[in-house]
Amino acid sequence: MLTITFAKTLDRVPLEVRDQLRSRLEETARTLASLPSGSVVWDSLYESGMLLEVGGWRFQYRIDREKQQMIVQAARFRDS
């Protein structure tokens, strides 16, 4: 299963939002683990960045094929 890492600290993101983010990413990782390794979906995931919105925050993340990591790269409050 993919591990979840953060490229930057999320100190300015409220703790409740961070907890919800981690929970959603873990669920996403569990779901992705059920896909066959040869699925064309993986090629798309490895090549594309993804967005997830939680509690008014938008998080950008990607999947690193070699490290088998889901990496949160950026966090931005929707109004900023």
Image (cartoon, grey):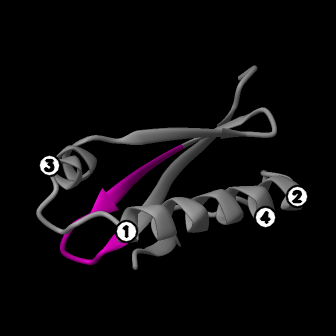
| Cα separation between marks 3 and 4 | 31 Å
| Cα separation between marks 2 and 1 | 28 Å
Q: Tell me the residue at 79%/52% (across/down).
A: 12
Q: Is 71 rendered above or below residue 3?
A: above
Marks 1 and 4: CB-CB under 8 Å? no
Depth order, front residue of 74/68: 68
The residue beneath circle 4 is 19
Amino acid type at image mark 1: Ser
Amino acid type at image mark 4: Asp
Q: Position of residue 61 (x, y in %)?
A: 45, 50
Q: Is 69 rendered above or below residue 31?
A: below
Q: Residue furthest top?
A: 79
If you read the primary sequence from the N terminus, does the residue marked by circle 2 or circle 1 appear first? 2
Quadrant of the rendering where the N terminus is positioned: bottom left
If you read the primary sequence from the N terminus, does the residue marked by circle 3 or circle 4 appear first? 4
- Residue 78 located left or right of residue 44: right
Marks 2 and 1: CB-CB under 8 Å? no
The residue beneath circle 1 is 34
Instruction: Determine whether the residue tagged by mark 1 lies in a helix, strand or loop.
Output: loop
